[in-house]
Image (tube, grey):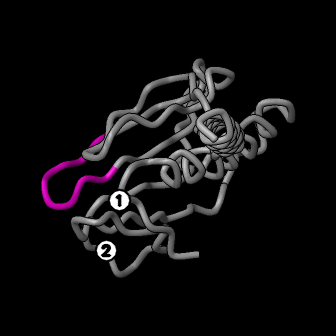
Amino acid sequence: MQNNKNKKKDIIIVSLLIVCIIAGAAVVAFQQTDYQKKEWTGIPVDTPKGTLFFSDEWSEYLDVQVDDTNDYSITFSGKYDKYQIKLFTLTFGENEENTVLGIFQDGTCVSVKMYPLEIPEDIPEEKQDAFYAMQEEINNLNEQLQEMDGFQSEN
């Protein structure tokens, strides 16, 4: 009789161990499929909410101007020779004129104003293409915002 009780006890212990192993494996599998943030690199651009990175590819053309007199605005421009062409402005704060990208949990609104590219004709075509590609960097910056803690997209 005592032997049967020990066998039942052993079976229960082994069963519990198997359940724990399966549960542990499920947790590991869930953690591995959990969303992993990208490791961004490039030209660092500080914002009130963290650092964004503009592609290194455009380092020779990029000009970044920060205006923190009212809201915190960052204007990205392309420069070539004697020309400086505005690409877009990211604003952290209230700005009803721009397209809202999202809002942080503390209520800070992030918006973007895109500028029409008016590229002088005397800029070589391959350089003109660089300005268009630089303007498309807003997509990468927006993706980085999406990954910031507390940011809720408007899309």
Q: Residue furthest left?
A: 69
- The residue at the point 77 percent across, 31 percent down is 127
Q: Residues within 10 Å of mark 1 (few under 14, many from 20)?
A: many
**Residue 112 screen position, x and y as percent:** 47, 63
User: Residue 125 falls in which quadrant of the image?
Assistant: top right
**Residue 42 screen position, x and y as percent:** 56, 22
Which quadrant is the C terminus positioned in?
bottom right
| Residue 126: mark in rendering | none
Q: Is residue 107 left or right of residue 78?
A: left
In the image shown, does 20 or 26 lie closer to the viewer? Answer: 20
The stretch in magenta equals 66-73
Instruction: Using the image, determine if residue 1 lies above or below residue 97.
Output: above
- The residue at the point 44 percent across, 26 percent down is 44
Q: Which residue is mark 2?
A: 95
**Residue 97 screen position, x and y as percent:** 39, 79
Q: CB under 8 Å between callouts 1 and 2? A: yes
Identify residue type, mark 1.
Thr
Q: Which residue is mark 1?
A: 91
Instruction: Using the image, determine if residue 124 lies above or below residue 49.
Output: above
Task: Give the Cα distance between marks 1 and 2.
Answer: 7 Å
Q: Residues within 10 Å of mark 2 (few under 14, many from 20)?
A: some
Q: Is residue 68 left or right of residue 57?
A: left
User: Residue 92 falls in which quadrant of the image?
Assistant: bottom left
Which quadrant is the N terminus positioned in?
top right
Instruction: Using the image, determine if residue 42 lies above or below residue 150.
Output: above
Q: Is residue 125 magenta?
A: no
Q: Residue furthest front?
A: 1
